[in-house]
Image: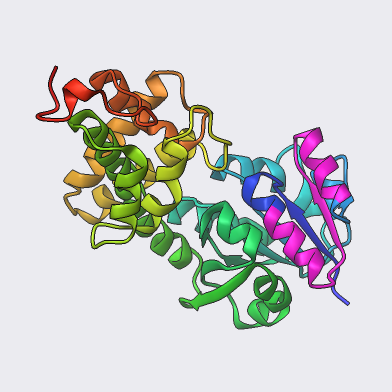
Amino acid sequence: MSRAAIIGLGAMGQGMARNILAAGIALKGFDLSQSARARFGQAGGAAAETAAEAAAGCDLLLVMVATAEQAHEALFGSGAAAAALASDAVVLLCSTVAPASARNIATRLQDMGHQMIDAPVSGGQVGADAGTLTVMASGPEDAFLRADPLLAAVSDTVYRLGSEPGLGATHKVVHQLAAGVHLVAAAELMALGVKAGCDAQTLYEIVSGAAGNSWMFSDRAPRMMQADPEVTSTIDIFIKDVGLVLEAGQDAGAPLPMAEAAFAVLRQAGDMGLGARDDSEVVRVYEAKTARPVNAQPKDEDTTNGTS
């Protein structure tokens, strides 16, 4: 029986961990947050005080942190998780990172005698909680065979994209162009609708059942109508991800005007001090300009032309 661990017990890591445990796989886990470790322990996991303690003697390690820098720190820096693993372990890097970062981490792990699956995921907290994530993965065949129980527990679709690290990261970064643009478009749509006299809830129901819908709109627009939505994915994460999209476009020599526009709005949200808030709160950028919160009912005098 393989011994498994997870590093990163945030909004998505918690759901992934719960589904791994529900599949009957014993799991150790670590997060810098004490409360996250406590929630993991309450779910039946074995919470560790350090990344190295979580990884000690494990054959499988799933890394679900926010950035490449955090992954490096957990694996090779103060976390020292890679050195604590059993020999010839498999590391699943599920974080969204630049392709070059994925290749660098894979090379360092290989030099230490380990294998890596470059395995970023999509589906958000909803997919993590339901065990229905989409995985965009590349890595050695043997590593896939060994990691299959973990992948099956957290996902309903795994795209095998080849053996070279960086291929999974490339597909995920390109995917984030759509996610980031759709997020900002949803905020713009809701803010325009309310300013022009639409009822926010009715507008949401119309769009979510019509041709203009997107997964991001259906998932984020309801939170845009909340004054203080629960944090499931932060604006800072999307600033990072769409920044990676722009880097990919520069490397490929591809123009990305829509990604650039979305990035500018996300950066405005960050400059407003909203970086650690739920990414649905990017709508606050528009609210600041329209002077109308999207959760408000339209005023009678605004229902004709959107002007007072």
Compared with residue 69, is residue 207 higher up or lower down, i.e. above or below?
A: below
Residue 303 drawn at (x, y percent) = 17, 30
> Residue placed farthest to the front in the image?
300
Q: Position of residue 159 (x, y in %)?
A: 49, 76
Left or right placement of residue 305 versus residue 104 in this view: left
Relative to the observer, which residue lies in front, 207 or 54? 207
Magenta residues, as a range?
A: 15-42
Q: Of residues 47 and 203, which is closer to you in this image?
A: 203
Q: Residue at x 65, y 67 (%)?
A: 154
Residue at 25% over, 45% down: 259
Q: Main secondary structure of the magenta part?
A: helix
- Residue 191's place in the image compared with 12, above or below, is above
Residue located at (82% from left, 59% from top)? 85
Residue 107 visible in the current orientation: no
User: Magenta stretch: residue 187 in it?
Assistant: no
Q: Is residue 40 magenta?
A: yes
Observer-nearest residue: 218 or 305?
305
Residue 90 visible, this orientation: yes
For the N terminus, the image quarter is bottom right
**Which of the 4 quarters of the picture holds residue 114?**
bottom right
Residue 60 picture location, percent across and down: 76, 66
Looking at the image, residue 171 sits to the left or right of residue 256; the answer is right
Pinpoint residue 279: horizontal percent, then vertical percent: 45, 37
Left or right, residue 245 beside residue 157: left
Total numbered labels placed on residues in the image: 0
